[in-house]
Amino acid sequence: MNATPKGVQPSISRQQTETRDRLPFSDSQDFEDARRGFIARRTPNAVTNADGAVVWDNDTYAFLEGEAPDTVNPSLWRQSKLVAEQGLFEVIDGIYQVRGLDLSNITFVEGTAGVLVIDPLISTETAAAALALYREHRGERPVTGVLYTHSHVDHFGGVKGVTTQEDVDAGRCTVIAPEGFTEHAVAENVYAGTAMGRRAAYMYGAALARGPRGAIGAGLGQTTSTGTVTLIPPTLTITETGQEEVVDGIRMVFQMAPNTEAPAEVLIHFPDFRALCTAEDATHTLHNLLTLRGAVVRDPHAWSHALTETIDLFGETTDVAFASHHWPTWGQERVVDFLSVQRDLYGYLHDQSLRLINKGWTGIEIAEHLKLPPALENAWNTHGYYGSVSHNLKAVYQRYMGWFDGNPAHLWQHPPVEAGKRYVRFMGGADAVVDKARDSFDAGDYRWAAEVLSHVVFAQPDHAAARDLLADTLEQLGYGAENGTWRNFYLSGTTELRHGQFGTPTVTASPDIVAHLTPTMLFDAIAIQIDGPKAWDEKLTVDVRLTDADERYRLKLSNGVLSYSRAAQQTAADVTLTSTVHALSELAVTGLTPESLDRAGVQVEGDVSALRRLTAVLDPGDPDFPIVTP
């Protein structure tokens, strides 16, 4: 396998030049805003865990200076320079942000006695480093509140780096979150967490070297930290728009925004500061309607309407808007304009997709045809650095129409390996396909070259020439991508073809997350792991008795399905487990073997072999499954 990076091909160089000529690069307002209020930065800005391993190092992006090289789309280079700005910044007197210490921002709002922390990053290590930087320049204020704007891990995972469960339990720190937060935060990182984590390694360029030929950022933030993920459930839940709360003298007015960027999300107005936290519903990029790592498709219609409501509620009384990513926007008129453009962006994608759907267009056709209007295209904050017009339009189609485009020829297609074999045979064999693909590569038709070469690799995974040329092709597509996550996907595919699989560096289904599985969520997580065919003929029952919740469940395995019920049972179970809720949740990490149950303090009565039979049919996920090869 030829592992040498290739130079930029002429067609990509021409594309980069056209981008420089087409977009308003002379507009420097974003750079002024990204640097406004700078106080200090950590030097160096590497963060390590307790074992000394580096979990974050923003200094590795120091190469982002000057004009973009031809290996990077100039628009993405510009965005990455902005996002790489790091340090402690004053948003307004009393509100401060640390940026460049994780994928997201952490915000500090000063109260009467202490400080309210908004969105404490992914890892405890980066959150603690950010708090230390804040305290170094603003004093040793205690953390009197933590506010999670929504249920994604980069907005809560570092909570135990800024407070403790003991302080929360003692009432010294209030934890605030929107209704549904805990359920969504835990479920997203457990149910399909293995697959999402594996694809997130591609999305954030985890295995890529930092530099003009590798990782330069993900558009929303540079990348994800790889430290310790934690969770403390909220003690104050926001349930309705207009709800007002005061924590440590800080007045807050909340706007519920469910099913926008996250299934549980809230925006916050601070009347005494005339400041608005837009969470992740208005940032300096087109966001994802369907993230490339996988998720439930988001609702652009609800998103657009939520931003209209934001303008109506807070537009006249806001002088600065800040978000959980990127840099703030100052000035009442500029804030309203920014929110309006973001509102129109999601509304346009939704409405125009449906217009074309109702004319018979498919998702791929819509994505290839539909362009943003000039007023949106010329606003830097609408560009697809994280989401993209292309994959978001396909997501709208998926939301309304599903995977099937209506063409019966696509109703029962062969899976990739079988399709690959047939394509290759029809096109004259693997060598002939590679020769033709090389012509396409030389002509700059990388999209087609990638498609046909992928068929060869799936048909004949060991075909060295196909793997080499596919790696080269994905590399060129990465060089040309304006979207940070597209670039990372393309270059990660190149890396995997040249060097082998690299697994999942960031694991969000941490013990602290798993510990907050409810009993029914734990049962669902176990049911997802049942190897159906292996369990077809297995029948068993397990009773679970929770002493601290006065609850009893009957689990039943039959026909390859693990179901559960709280109804009273007329027959005895094969085996009964007696436990506390907390001890039960530990089993998601330790497993269901009798030995694990004993260590967790779970009492077992009955036929212990039933547990061994249940464990024998579990098939946990693979965090290193192949993506660009079969």
Image (cartoon, helix red, strand yellow):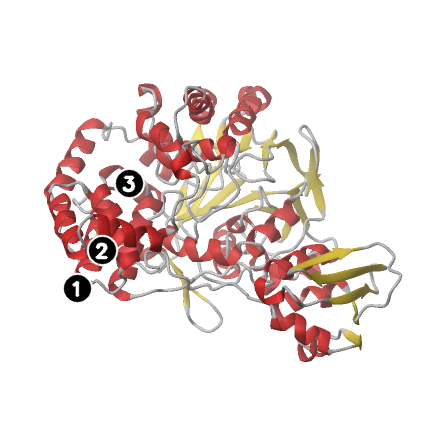
Pointer 1 with pointer 2, Cβ within 8 A: yes
Left or right, residue 294 beside residue 629 = right
Sequence order check: which comes first, mark 1 or mark 2?
Answer: 1
Mark sitting on residue 76:
3
Label 3 sits on what residue type? Leu
Return the residue at label 2: 471
Of the two numbered discs 2 and 3 on the same chain, state the one appearing first in sequence. 3
* Mark 3 or 1, nearer chain start: 1
- Seen from the viewer's position, the closer of residues 461 and 503 is 461
Image quarter in which the N terminus is found: bottom left
Q: Nearer the viewer, residue 356 or 288?
A: 356
Amino acid at pointer 2: Ala
x 18%, y 37%: residue: 16
CB within 8 Å, label 3 to label 1: no
Q: Where is mark 1, residue-wise?
A: 2
Is residue 178 visible in the rendered image? The answer is yes
Could you give the CA–CA distance between mark 1 and mark 2, rounded to whole angstroms?
A: 9 Å
Identity of the residue drawn at 66% across and 60% down: 559
Q: Secondary structure at mark 2?
A: helix
* Residue 535 occupies quadrant: bottom right
Q: CA distance from mark 3 to mark 1?
A: 28 Å
Which mark, by number, is residue 307? none
